[in-house]
Amino acid sequence: MTVSAGRARRVLIIVENLPSPFDRRVWQEATTLHEAGYEVSIICPTGKGYEKKHEVIDGIHIYRHNLPVEAEGGIGYLAEYTVALFWEFVLAWRVLLTRGFDVIHACNPPDNIFLVGGFFKLFGKKFLFDHHDINPELYEAKFGRRDFFYKVMLFWERWTFKLADVSIATNESYRKIAIERGGMAKDRVFVVRSGPKLDRLQILPPVDALKKGRKYLVGYVGVMGKQEGIDYLLRSVRYIVSELGRKDIQFGLVGGGTSLEEMKAYARELGVEDYVTFTGRVPDQEMLEMLNTADICVNPDVANEMNDKSTMNKIMEYMALGKPIVQFDLAEGRFSAQRSSLYAAKNDERDLANKLVDLLDDQALRQEMGEFGRKRVVEALAWSHEVPKLLNAYQVLFER
């Protein structure tokens, strides 16, 4: 039911790390709820070209606030979280007094939005937690230790689950964490995957110029950083060029991030800058041109506890475009891709390189894997399959 006492149910989505509509999962959820009859408002930061403090897009009211520069180090994260919480409280009051809301839909990271959700529960509002990242594991992957701040992450996560009326997980691994580590009842945790919208991921003719005169192109889309394994990928490129003697493969890497310039410098240090195209963050059309031109796609996410349990959106996007994949052997990556991917030994850059070359050299296998991936997305993983799951979670939420 989306109507209560003669009016539509009202949803306030709070997301701290990305603006809307740039964050695709959040925007897909917001538009789905709106189309189902909910009134939807979003609080999020500015950035990525979205600088208006308030605007209405497709019937959804978006309230944006400034943040300090992207956080680096303890002081940076403290500043970011403090400023974000301040504005989330201020703007939540603004939404409450102007449009109203019945539920706060909190998207992590970070896990401290429970402070806003818990406060407004005192006024009879419901609290739904949308579990995008496992922050204790993210902290450990980023800093390599389980110290006081790791325990703070666990504390925040525990209280988030404790206060949530309903939780949404992006996969079964996250659902298990909500139940076992968060103590939530099984019937209050729902899996809603970040499936791609197929109308956005158009299959286009290749743009041969992107191959830079070489026979093959390996595509990648995502953040440029060590957590994402770009350094592993670049060392694989060096092995392919210098030790395997392959000069016929270009790598097209699409995406930005705080480590982009560092990764460019590392490519120069390894002597492979001519074989790697870094586009930075580009419009969707340019991203689609690169991926459609690619003969295969790669996901070099480092094998660690966080990545093993996380679903990478890029995998499903590659599959939607019919691209065969090479990645390290991670549990959720294998669940998503199944037979559309080859799996290199964990964090073994030479095995990754060899599997990239083997796949490029086997056209029949590439076609078979690509067709399987496209079919799996269409039949099981696309956002259209997640819509009823999201709406069911909301129905259960308002039945409590």
Image: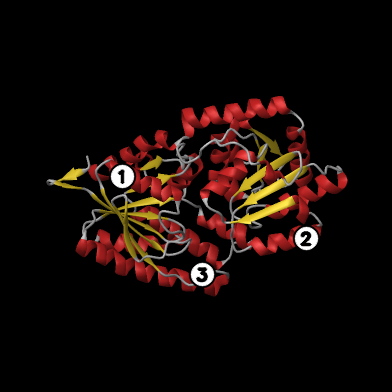
Residue at screen point 71% across, 39% down: 344
Camera-nearest label, 1 or 2:
2
Specify whether 182 is left or right of 4.
Answer: right
Secondary structure under tag 2 reads helix
Camera-nearest label, 3 or 1:
1
Rounded to the nearest angstrom, the CA distance separating label 1 from label 2 is 47 Å
For residue 33, the mark is 1
Q: Earlier in the sequence, mark 1 or mark 2?
A: 1
Q: In which quarter of the image is residue 294?
A: top right
Q: How is the image coloured?
A: secondary structure
Tag 3–tag 2 contact (CB < 8 Å): no
Tell me the amino acid under the disc marked 2: Arg
Q: In which quarter of the image is residue 292?
A: top right
Secondary structure under tag 1 reads helix
For residue 77, the mark is 3
Q: Mark 2 points at which residue?
A: 268
Rounded to the nearest angstrom, the CA distance separating label 3 from label 1 is 31 Å
Residue 205 seen anywhere in this rendered image of the structure: yes
Residue at screen point 72% across, 49% down: 233
Residue at screen point 51% across, 32% down: 377
Tell me the amino acid under the disc marked 3: Tyr
- Which corner quadrant holds the N terminus? top left
Q: Is residue 330 above or below residue 77?
A: above
Q: Position of residue 144 (x, y in %)?
A: 64, 61
Q: In which quarter of the image is residue 341?
A: top right
Q: Where is residue 34 in the image (x, y as percent from the top left)?
A: 29, 46
Q: In this view, does 137 lie above or below 4?
A: below
Which residue lies most toward the left here?
Answer: 6
Specify whether 117 is left or right of 359.
Answer: left
Q: Which of 396 and 210 is in front in this view?
A: 210
Camera-nearest label, 3 or 2:
2
